[in-house]
Image (tube, rainbow, N blue to C red):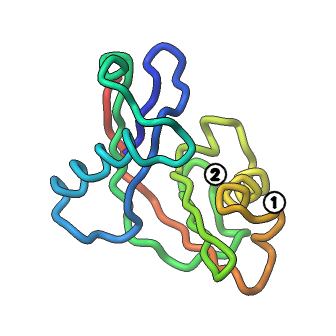
Amino acid sequence: MTLQVRATGDLRGCIGESKPRWPLVQSIGRASVSAATSDPRFVPVTTGELSSLTIAISALHPLLPIEASEIEVGRHGVMITGERGSSLLLPHVASAFGWDREEFLARLCEKAGLTPDAWTAPDLLLFGFEADTWGED
């Protein structure tokens, strides 16, 4: 679930699940509340803000192991995982910010609290996925 400020497109909250645990309708409800109240990067959304936000839902395809060289910007989202940290960025994020593959991977690492080049470490795993995204225009 991604919440953005309608006027600017700025991110206001984004939380979801990488593996299905509930039926889609329940996952959407849970993610909506979490994105609005529990994204650690933001203060909770207030009732007064609701009308100024847009919502986008991304349903992830299965996460599969992927090599960095196989990542196609705009097509693949990526999750990095390991003992030192983990994070996930959706497929459209790199395109939206004009990032190339290396910048996408560096930002993925930074989101996980890792150094920008941590994706090259053998103890960290990359998983690629595609996603179906829909929301407000």
Residue drawn at (75%, 70%) of the image = 119
Residue 73: give its label.
2
Q: Nearer the viewer, mark 2 or mark 1?
A: 1
Q: Is residue 85 left or right of residue 5?
A: right
Picture layout, residue 66 above or below residue 61 = below
**Element at label 2:** loop
Q: Is residue 93 left or right of residue 98?
A: left
Work out which quarter of the rendered image holds the C terminus and state it: top left
**Residue 106 location (% of width, % of height):** 76, 57
Name the residue carrying label 1: 116
Picture layout, residue 37 above or below residue 54 = below
**Residue 8 location (% of width, % of height):** 54, 17
Distance, label 2 to label 1, CA atoms, is 17 Å
Residue drawn at (37%, 39%) of the image = 36
**Residue 103 location (% of width, % of height):** 77, 51
Residue drawn at (38%, 42%) of the image = 37
Residue 83: give its label.
none
